Amino acid sequence: MSLELNSLSSNNFSKVSLFQAYNNIHDYDIICLSETFLDSTIASDDKNITINGYNLIRADHPLNIKRGGVAIYYKENIAIRTIDIPGISECLLCEIDIENKKGYLLVVYRSPSQSNDDFETFLLQLENVLSNLIHQKSLFNIVLGDFNARSSAWWSNDTTNNEGTQIECLTSLYGFEQMISEPTHMIQNFSSSIDLIDQLAKSILE
């Protein structure tokens, strides 16, 4: 499951209860969150954000402020190893072991307020990650999260901006395909698809 939260702690952590209720129906192995808005005042073992049977890993805003950030809940019986990515702070790259085979999951939050230079650095580091992933003998490669970018290639009724054009070109270049074909961000009369789930076309689960 992938969710964009706009703060995990808001309204006295009520969103935790909401997606726990949803998870009780679907029993997800892995729950990926973006825009967690967590900082060092909230420990990972804080009872307000713990879920029975799940471990939690997170990457908060690099300035330790309650903005952005990503997190992953995963079942305790799943073997996950996090891999450090220089240059992209609000992301988690995980190697997942399934029956002695490896799969890779990248969860990303990209701030819409990035400067042009910061965005170019982000693209460069993202390209490094994608390039490394496609050379792994992996069971699957999945990239997801809140990219705050728009492209009509992801949803035909959306507008396209510069960030969307470049991210779409980059992911397509490395063989990734967008798995969502409907809007993920809706405010009043405006809809967009800025929260992505890209899976490497040649590494679909068999």
Image (cartoon, helix red, strand yellow):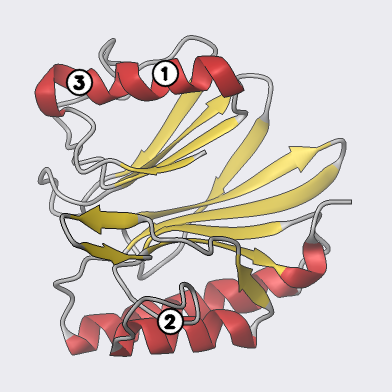
Q: Quadrant of residue 43?
A: top left
Q: Which amino acid, by three-letter code, is at mark 1? A: Gln
Tell me the residue that label 3 is attached to. 13
Q: Mark 3, residues whose alpha carbon is within 10 Å: few (<14), some, or many (≥20)? A: few
Secondary structure at badge 3 equals helix
Tell me the residue that label 2 is attached to. 152
Q: Which amino acid, by three-letter code, is at mark 3? A: Phe
Tell me the residue that label 1 is attached to. 20
Q: How far is disc 1 from disc 2 in space, using C-alphas?
A: 33 Å
Name the front one of labels 1 and 2: 2
Q: Quadrant of residue 147?
A: bottom left
Q: Are marks 1 and 3 in contact (CB under 8 Å)?
A: no
Task: Give percent across and percent down for residue 101.
Answer: 84, 46
Q: Does residue 200 lie above or below 63 as drawn?
A: below
Q: Quadrant of residue 3?
A: top left
Q: Does residue 123 lie above or below 133 as drawn?
A: below
Q: Are marks 1 and 2 in contact (CB under 8 Å)?
A: no
Residue 16 appears left or right of 133 = left
Q: Which amino acid, by three-letter code, is at mark 2? A: Ser
Q: Does residue 27 lie above or below 31 as drawn?
A: above
Residue 140 appears left or right of 51 = right
Q: How far is disc 1 from disc 3 in space, using C-alphas?
A: 11 Å
